[in-house]
Image: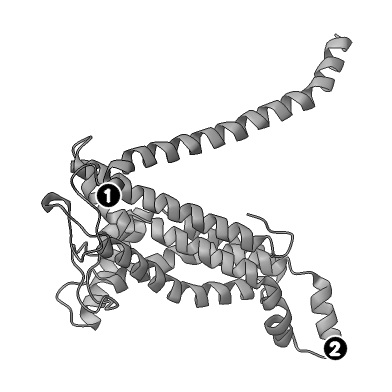
Amino acid sequence: MRQIRRLLRRKLPEWAEAVTMLCALNSIAVLSLIVLFVAWEALPALLGWTGVSLTFENKWSVEHEKCGLYVLLVSSLMASMGALAMAIPVGVAAAIFLAEVIPGGLREAVRPLIELLGAIPSVLYGFVGLKVVVPTVQRLFNLYYGQTALTASIVLAVMIVPTIVSLSSEIISAVPVEYREASLALGATKWQTVRHIVLPTAMPGIVASAILAFGRAMGETVAVVMVAGTSTELARPFWDFLQPIYPMTAAIAMGFGEAEVGGAAYHVYFAIGAILLAFAFTVNLVASLLLRKAPTRVRL
């Protein structure tokens, strides 16, 4: 019995290492299969083999062979950039407050509440946006239709704020305390220390958190479908945030279910998915590179 126990103790680290390696390889294999499958199904549309080509015209109607990526790309960028413009100031300010102002005990109680906002299902955000934000925007701007790019940006901003707050506050907290002590010893105030020492040191990580939040906004589906308006043609100028938009995720959610398997529309929607997949990979790669320059406590 003792020999069996000794054998188990001696082999357990090796077995644990083998299991963790298998899990890592399994994750890589699953990701590779997803990428290959999406790329294979998207290839006919990207190369024009289906007779329906992706163009940059200002019209999206797969049924009439009008596949203008201009509508989808510009709509996704409008909603995401608008959300970032609103979420970054609020998120960074909240992160500074959590990391530098609020007492430690209260910080540990408030941080989970903020992170809880990120765990709320997106359909609930969409429902609140549809019942509260849409009528408010419609009334304030005297619009006939309240589902606009501005509405989508507001809802997305609320959804991505927890991402910015959570990661940015951790990065700001990871700035070495010696930096703060040296600044205060030289006569700087606490706010001067935060502004000129802490924030520049944590800036790569803060930018990375904004990039990850941007990726989250680009990939959001249900809430955007409910509040964006899904217009298949954009008005001029395209930066008018009071017009309905049709982001890429909304196009897939609304059109893919009715597409015939193997048909032209089927491959077109996979092509949009491939574009989103490439974008998600790029966003995570850039964020990872930036986090390498962040304080060492935080890594993606």
Give residue 275's position: percent from left, percent from top: 38, 53
Q: Is residue 227 visible?
A: no
For label 1, count other residues whose C-alpha is less than 10 Å away and answer few (under 14), some (14-19) or many (20+): some
Check contact, mark 1 vs mark 2: CB within 8 A: no
- Residue 20 vertical placement versus 224 (above, below): above
Give the residue drawn at x 14%, y 52%.
65
Secondary structure beneath disc 1?
helix
**For mark 1, what is the residue?**
253
For label 2, count other residues whose C-alpha is less than 10 Å away and answer few (under 14), some (14-19) or many (20+): few
Nearest the viewer among 266 and 198 is 266
Nearest the viewer among 44 and 105 is 44
Q: Amino acid at mark 1?
A: Ala
Rendered image quadrant of residue 177: bottom right
Left or right, 135 with reference to 109: left
Secondary structure beneath disc 2?
loop
Mark 2 or mark 1, which is nearer the start of the sequence? Answer: 2
- State the CA–CA distance, disc 1 to disc 2: 57 Å
Q: Is residue 66 visible?
A: yes
Rendered image quadrant of residue 73: bottom left
- Residue 49 vertical placement versus 69 (above, below): above
**For mark 2, what is the residue?**
186
Left or right, 300 with reference to 11: left
Give the residue drawn at x 50%, y 56%.
282
Nearest the viewer among 119 and 44 is 44
Nearest the viewer among 124 and 279 is 279
Give residue 29's position: percent from left, percent from top: 53, 33
